[in-house]
Amino acid sequence: MPTAPLRLQSVVADFRRRLGELRAALRREVRTAGGWRNRAELVLVTATLLGLRFACLPAGGLLRLARWSARPARRGRGAPPPATVPPPVPAAPPAAEPPPPPPPAAEPPPAVPAARPIVPVPAGKVFPRRTFSALLCTYNDAATLGRAVEAVVRQSRPPDEYLILDDASTDETPEILAGYAARYPFIKVLCKEKNEGCNKGINELTRLAAGEYIHWGASDDYMLPGFIEHAMRLAEEFPRAGIISGELVNTSEHWNNVDRLLEIPGWATGYVTPEKYLHEYLEAGDPRGTLAPSTIFRRAAVLEMGGWRKELGTWDVSFVLQASALKYGMGYVDRPCYTWVYRKRATTHRANSDLLRSTEAYLNYLRLARTPPFRGLFSEKFLRLWFFANMELAASTFAEAALEQVFAGESAGDAAQPAA
């Protein structure tokens, strides 16, 4: 069995190989990303995050890369040389100014507003009823599937239909779904003979759904009581809104069961304009996460945006969410609506652990956001914040996975060593 240093060398060599592939891919992107103002940042972000931490770049490589990014852009053939500007005439020295007044006393910070309860709709105000479809694509999730389905069927307003796609599960999932379909007439189960992936399955369910509004659920997450009722109340009051989002409870099997609430402070239940969504949320909040799990979508808007795009990786849902809100506005529910469970074996963590795959998805996101029909919806300020924040998250997740691989190998090697 190889020793621990040899295993570490193997991991570092694999890391350097992947980093080389990433740098090459980003260099190709720089050559073709003509509309990006500071194109070299696409390379420098990864080189800085990874090269400085692990010293995997050749000696002087980062310095040469920085010098390359600072070079002025080449002028085209026949372009006139820069105009010569005469030196400015020195101005007379300014007169002495009186000393500035003392600064005012510091004011106490404003109090954080408390969460606002939902205001009931007046008795005389009735809106046309809209239909709602809950969607779920599952594969070998028998351990958590029952909790997810129970949370939907026990809603104060059940869905008009609940479409569940079994993507060729090999555990007890088919039997569990058959039992629920027999008890609840609005549940429709579709079974595949071959596993084809969640993205393809959820796109099929979106096209099959009869509801005007849809929600994409997950087998290991679950709705909170009242989600559908409160979200659809806003959808019926503001039918132009592209999405309706509520507060999201984040929990993890690695946080000792401590929940974290993802909300938008200061926002009350009601309609949010595209401008307010952009400036007060996208450009001012944490760009690494969204309220996608606690969001229902106007189905026509989803189809207009092209559906859930596989090339965006784990951002397939959030891109549609953001584009819909930036075009049509959104409804916001000021109460916890959904619980999202983070697991290291889940899709999000596995995707972030693959640095090359994550980077490719992020670049696809940027390309799509800057092409019709989405050009002009996303601000450059937000796209920069979004790209750097998510690249840092992917790099740290990848580094954590690499270290865990080293430590796991050392532990296995120590256990195999004979006792002295």
Image (cartoon, helix red, strand yellow):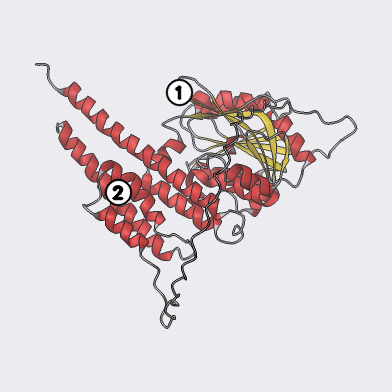
Q: Nearer the viewer, mark 2 or mark 1?
A: 1
Three-letter residue code for mark 1: Trp
Q: Earlier in the sequence, mark 2 or mark 1?
A: 2
Give the quadrant of the N terminus: top left
Locate residue 34 relative to residue 333 in the image: left or right: left
User: In the figure, 317 relative to 7: above or below?
Assistant: below
Q: Give the residue pinned by disc 2.
A: 18
Which residue is at 65% across, 50% downward? Answer: 326
- The answer to whether any part of residue 204 appears in the image is no
Residue 133: give x, y in percent of width and height: 68, 38
In the figure, residue 67 lies in which quadrant? Answer: bottom left
Q: Give the residue pinned by disc 1.
A: 255
Residue 327: give x, y in percent of width and height: 67, 52
From the viewer's side, name the closer residue of 142 and 382.
382
User: In the figure, 201 relative to 68: above or below?
Assistant: above
Which residue is at 49% across, 24% downward? Answer: 143
